[in-house]
Amino acid sequence: MSTSIAHKDTIVADPPLAKLLFSDTRLAPVWFIVRMYVGFSWLDAGWHKVIDTGAKTNYIIDGSGIYAFWQRIAATPVAPAKPVITYDWYNGFIQFLVTNHWENFFGKLIAFGEVAVGLGIERRDDGVLRREDLDRRVRQRLARAHVLHDRDDLALLRRRRR
């Protein structure tokens, strides 16, 4: 789907390279491979965090893996060396998490979040919003909101959209 920006009498079309990369269906196999690779990477990283129950590396049981990582990045090095985190606000945030022992909560959140993102990327639809899908979604939302009471409301809604 090609997008254009219209402002008063000026229309700016998408650049040809953007049209080729994002609107041309000939590149769908390339994007499918990229999506599968990225999705598998997220899924693999999260799954290792879920199933790894080693004493120093687990994220699920007591969060010692994320706790060790936080301690390593929040440590203040000796004088000539620079800290791993250069932003003071982020260092303070990580220090807060270490001090208040948030590793148990965030360990589970990170591990299961990475698995969910990986599955979501791999199971993603093609991104094309079809009119019948839009009609169905609008009807479902209106029905949930108790706005759509009978067929007259649906007909009125369709006339307004045209």
Image: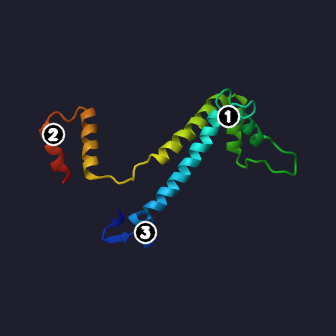
Q: Earlier in the sequence, mark 2 or mark 3?
A: 3
Up-down relation of residue 54 to residue 90 (above or below): above
Residues at marks 1 and 2, CA–CA distance in whole angstroms: 55 Å
Q: Nearer the viewer, residue 10 or 28?
A: 28
Q: Nearer the viewer, residue 65 or 76?
A: 65
Residue type, numbered disc 2? Asp
Q: Earlier in the sequence, mark 3 or mark 1?
A: 3
Q: What quarter of the picture does the C terminus occupy?
A: bottom left
Residue 160, position as x, y percentages in the image? 18, 49
Q: Which residue is mark 2?
A: 153
Q: Nearer the viewer, mark 3 or mark 1?
A: 1
Residue 134, position as x, y percentages in the image? 28, 48
Left or right, 2 with respect to 46, comes to left
Q: What numbered label is drawn on residue 52?
A: 1
Dot 2: what SS? helix
Q: Residue furthest right?
A: 79
Dot 1: what SS? loop
Q: Which residue is mark 3?
A: 20
Residue type, numbered disc 3? Leu
Residues at marks 2 and 3, CA–CA distance in whole angstroms: 41 Å
Left or right, 81 with respect to 53, comes to right
Dot 3: what SS? helix
- Are circles 1 and 2 on residues that touch, CB within 8 Å? no
- Residue 21 seen anywhere in this rendered image of the structure: yes
Residue type, numbered disc 1? Asp
Give the residue drawn at x 55%, y 53%: 37
Q: Which quarter of the picture shows residue 7?
A: bottom left
- Are circles 3 and 1 on residues that touch, CB within 8 Å? no
10 Å crowding of disc 2: few (<14), some (14-19), many (20+): few
Residue 24, position as x, y percentages in the image? 39, 66
Give the residue drawn at x 78%, y 48%: 83
Give the residue drawn at x 52%, y 39%: 116
